[in-house]
């Protein structure tokens, strides 16, 4: 959001008086107010149409907080579906913790390197210049 303090507004007003003169300034202020009002009406109409198109399940949609809107309507339902999966995977995570500690220790590194299968180097892939 635009943040102006008192001195910045005073400086802008002084520049406006110097640039446009005191005769044209009231007319320009009225035109600026009309433009702001017109843009506000467009934004309100757009948000009203969006609520109308989304339907009643999004009637409490708060367009001023997009992060909260995404969290409430998109992330919370997904997290609710993932909770049973998290509970199911928790015992597996507990089993893997000792193996992770062993793999990161320096004494287990030679053992793990011997246990790894030999991996063939990647084959070159044909590249067609005309296909790109």
Image (tube, rainbow, N blue to C red):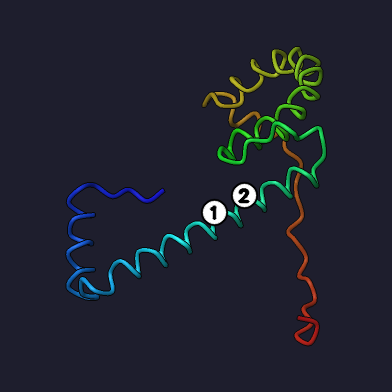
Identity of the residue drawn at 80% across and 32% down: 57
Identity of the residue drawn at 71% across and 18% down: 93
Residue 106 placement (x, y as % from top left): 52, 26
**Label 2: few (<14), some or many (≥20) within 10 Å?**
few
Residue 44's disc is 2
Identify the residue under disc 1. Answer: 40
Residue 36, above or below 50:
below
Residue 72 placement (x, y as % from top left): 68, 30
Which one is in front, 29 or 71? 29
Q: Secondary structure at mark 2?
A: helix
Identity of the residue drawn at 68% across and 35% down: 61
- Quarter of the image with the C terminus is bottom right
Residue 3's disc is none
- The number of discs equals 2
Q: Residue furthest bottom?
A: 130
Left or right of 54 on screen, residue 7: left
Residue 108 placement (x, y as % from top left): 59, 25
Residue 123 placement (x, y as % from top left): 78, 65
Left or right of 128 on screen, residue 64: left
* Distance in Å between CA atoms under marks 1 and 2: 6 Å
Which one is in front, 121 or 34? 34
Q: Are marks 1 and 2 in contact (CB under 8 Å)?
A: yes
Identity of the residue drawn at 80% across and 82% down: 131
């Amino acid at each position: 959001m635009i943040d102006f303090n008192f001195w910045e507004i005073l400086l802008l007003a002084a520049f406006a008086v110097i640039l446009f003169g005191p005769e044209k300034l009231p007319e320009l202020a009225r035109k600026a107010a009309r433009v702001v009002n017109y843009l506000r009406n467009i934004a309100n109409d757009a948000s009203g149409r969006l609520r109308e198109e989304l339907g009643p399940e999004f009637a409490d949609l708060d367009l001023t907080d997009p992060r909260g809107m995404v969290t409430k309507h998109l992330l919370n339902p997904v997290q609710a579906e993932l909770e049973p999966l998290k509970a199911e995977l928790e015992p597996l995570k507990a089993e893997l913790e000792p193996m992770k500690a062993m793999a990161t220790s320096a004494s287990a590194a030679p053992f793990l390197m011997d246990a790894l299968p030999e991996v063939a180097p990647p084959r070159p892939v044909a590249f067609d210049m005309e296909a790109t």
